Amino acid sequence: MRSFDPRIVGAVECRAWETYYRREWAAFLVASVRMVRAAFRMSWPRTLRGAWLVLRANQKWAPVPDNDPQAARALMAAFYRLLAASEPRVAFDPERASELEVEWWRAHRAHQGGAESFESLAAALTDLYAYTYAVPADDVRRAAELRAEAMDVSDAWVAAGCDPTDPQLARERALLVRSYAALLAGVHG
């Protein structure tokens, strides 16, 4: 999880967000498989299981206002247990990692609705990165800010109707690539 290609991970995450907001769950699963494999390099059986867990967690989170954060956290905890089993150097608690994961989902949804600031979203992402990669928050803050900025672009794309030909997707992708490049740099000091 400390060695990945930011261009691939950023592009695949952009695709995952696009399919999430269009509720194209089969395409989201394909993007999740590609994202889990590119970002974490787990074995194929673990990649497939991990992508399924990510899909199910997102489906539990997606409905507004009747989502199920507890189920989303449980599914993400299973994902983080799978990741921890695949990474001998991982030292995080999967339950805590899942709490931080779903917290940034919550912060993003609140930010989308105007109830929370950009800074609180970036802070939630920073907390997740710092915890799961066991690095100082300052080392991963820029990665979190760029990813939050990509979310703002994605939110504008959603508000404009989720057109898959909208040039905003290219801007979102570029921000995600920059975010993952900054994460990689932050993780390696």
Image (spheres, helix red, strand yellow):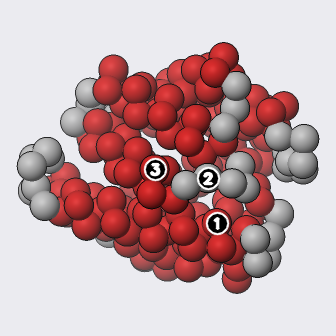
Badge 2 amino acid: Phe
Q: Which residue is mark 1?
A: 184
| Element marked by disc 3 | helix
- Nearest to N terminus: mark 1 or mark 2: 2
Q: Is residue 152 left or right of residue 93?
A: left
Contact? badges 1 and 2 (CB < 8 Å): yes
Residue extending farthest to the top is 45
Badge 3 amino acid: Ile
Badge 1 amino acid: Leu
Query: How far is the residue under mark 1 from the one under mark 2?
Result: 8 Å
| Element marked by disc 2 | loop
Q: To which quarter of the image does residue 144 belong?
A: bottom right
Q: Which residue is mark 2?
A: 4
Q: Residue at x 40, y 26 (%)?
A: 30
Q: Nearer the viewer, residue 5 or 162?
A: 5
Q: Is residue 168 above or below residue 51?
A: below
